């Protein structure tokens, strides 16, 4: 019998969404058997089509279903043949409840990150938009009788500083930073994502109410909440709806609370309008300008030995189209190359006591040119065009 990959994938999706439904209703047995069927279909898919580009996704799904099955089996306790001692069973249950709580805490980071505005190079527009929306209302809420935007979406190519910006915002204000990553939220909380989304917002609200300090709830890779595929494999539809409801709470009755939701994504086009509407500020985090690239080169080559002719402004011109994180990688690669030269030199020897250990040679402009030929920008011009096109329609400052 020949099974088309699409057919097997549909089967897996069907079982998985049934499993999630049972799971959220507390029907553990049914949930487990449906997760298992979904795994079986995915494993078959992996065996029949070992070359498929989607295999990584299938493997990740298998893993998350496996983990969920394990969690369900443990939470239920394996029924022993002999009458169990009630006390030890209770103990076990309480330990597991504790573990579940810790699991939740794992995703949430309440300390301040140690990134400052100054470390985020360029992106002046984005910085001032964030500053205005968070710092001003916190100082003088009386000046905002109509309220102020609570939802902010940072979008743009990878490696441009979205995560850094959110961290710096949290650092610069006296408040709390709750950092969750939506993609791990969906996989780790499989079947429970919906419930946990509301737990998360409740927690954030409690902090904002109790302390009267601003709270930033940062949801990285927020597009994962919507799921990448049409089928509801990760319970995405319900989780997304829960998220939207919670956002309404933040924008509506919690209007005077200093609770902000900052979402980040590099796939803004996968967000739909109901979702976007709740993020009143939509801020484009772009590739660095010539000036920003120069600053980045100054910053990242500062600790390196370099020839006096190495000029950050020239490097910035050469590396047009490279992201901030590309530039960091380029500087690192250049430096590492000089270290390899030390180790590969014919007269390399272990440092001898009393002798100054050999140091890397100075970097030259041609080292950087060399790396450029081997390392393309991580963002293509087509991608940039797509971001611009999306911005024309949806950007909101
Ligand atoms: N504007 C910037 N100024 C200084 N360094 C930056 C900047 N943007 C990125 N970097 C460097 O690149 C690393 C990755 O940046 P960051 O994680 O903020 O990117 P991102 O936009 O969130 O990417 P992704 O979309 O992949 O999550 C940072 O840790 C930092 O070292
Ligand atoms: Mg990021």
Image: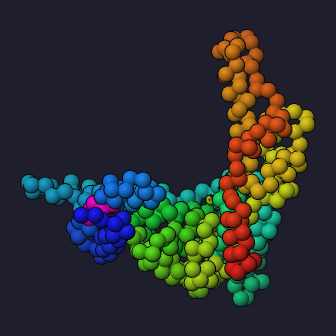
Residue shown at the point (76%, 26%) measured from the top left:
360
Q: How many marks overall?
A: 0
Against 274, residue 38 (above or below) is above
Q: Nearer the viewer, residue 274 or 79?
A: 274
Nearer to us in this view, 337 or 160: 337
- Where is 243 relative to 333, above or below? below
Q: Position of residue 294 (x, y in %)?
A: 85, 51
Secondary structure, magenta segment, majority class: helix
Do we see residue 168 in this rendering? no
- Which colour scheme appears in the figure? rainbow
Region of the chain picked out in magenta, as a range? 36-42
Q: Give ligand 2's quarter of the image.
A: bottom right
Q: Looking at the rendering, which quadrant does residue 29 occupy? A: bottom left
Position of 308 with respect to 10 (left or right) is right
Query: Which residue occupies the extreme right position in the image?
Result: 309
Is residue 39 located in the magenta-colored stretch of the structure? yes
- Say which quarter of the image contains residue 304: top right
The residue that appears at 59% across and 86% down in the rendered structure is 252
């Amino acid at each position: 019998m020949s099974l088309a990959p699409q057919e097997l994938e549909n089967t897996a999706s069907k079982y998985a969404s049934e499993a999630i439904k049972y799971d959220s209703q507390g029907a553990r047995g049914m949930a487990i058997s449906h997760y298992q069927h979904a795994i079986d279909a995915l494993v078959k898919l992996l065996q029949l089509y070992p070359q498929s580009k989607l295999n990584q996704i299938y493997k990740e799904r298998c893993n998350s279903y496996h983990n969920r099955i394990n969690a369900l089996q443990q939470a239920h306790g394996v029924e022993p043949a002999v009458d169990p001692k009630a006390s030890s069973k209770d103990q076990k249950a309480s330990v597991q409840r504790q573990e579940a709580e810790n699991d939740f805490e794992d995703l949430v980071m309440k300390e301040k990150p140690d990134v400052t505005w100054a470390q985020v190079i360029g992106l002046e527009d984005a910085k001032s938009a964030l500053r205005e929306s968070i710092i001003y209302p916190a100082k003088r809420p009386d000046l905002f009788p109509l309220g102020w935007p609570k939802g902010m979406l940072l979008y743009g190519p990878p490696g441009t500083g979205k995560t850094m910006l959110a961290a710096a915002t949290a650092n610069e204000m006296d408040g709390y930073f709750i950092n969750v990553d939506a993609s791990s939220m969906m996989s780790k909380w499989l079947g429970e994502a919906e419930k946990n989304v509301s737990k998360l917002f409740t927690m954030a609200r409690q902090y904002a109410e109790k302390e009267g300090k601003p709270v930033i709830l940062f949801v990285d890779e927020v597009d994962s909440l919507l799921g990448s595929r049409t089928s509801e494999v990760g319970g995405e539809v319900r989780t997304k709806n829960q998220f939207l409801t919670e956002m309404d709470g933040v924008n509506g009755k919690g209007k005077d609370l200093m609770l902000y939701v900052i979402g980040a994504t590099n796939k803004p086009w996968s967000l739909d309008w109901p979702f976007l509407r709740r993020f009143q500020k939509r801020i484009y985090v772009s590739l660095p300008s010539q000036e920003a690239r120069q600053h980045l080169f100054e910053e990242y080559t500062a600790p390196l030995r370099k020839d006096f002719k190495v000029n950050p402004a020239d490097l910035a011109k050469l590396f047009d189209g490279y992201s901030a994180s590309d530039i960091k990688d380029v500087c690192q690669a250049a430096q590492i190359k000089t270290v390899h030269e030390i180790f590969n030199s014919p007269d390399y020897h272990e440092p001898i006591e009393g002798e100054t250990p050999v140091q890397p040679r100075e970097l030259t402009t041609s080292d950087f040119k060399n790396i450029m030929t081997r390392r393309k920008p991580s963002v293509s011009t087509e991608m940039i065009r797509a971001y611009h096109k999306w911005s024309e329609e949806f950007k909101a400052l």
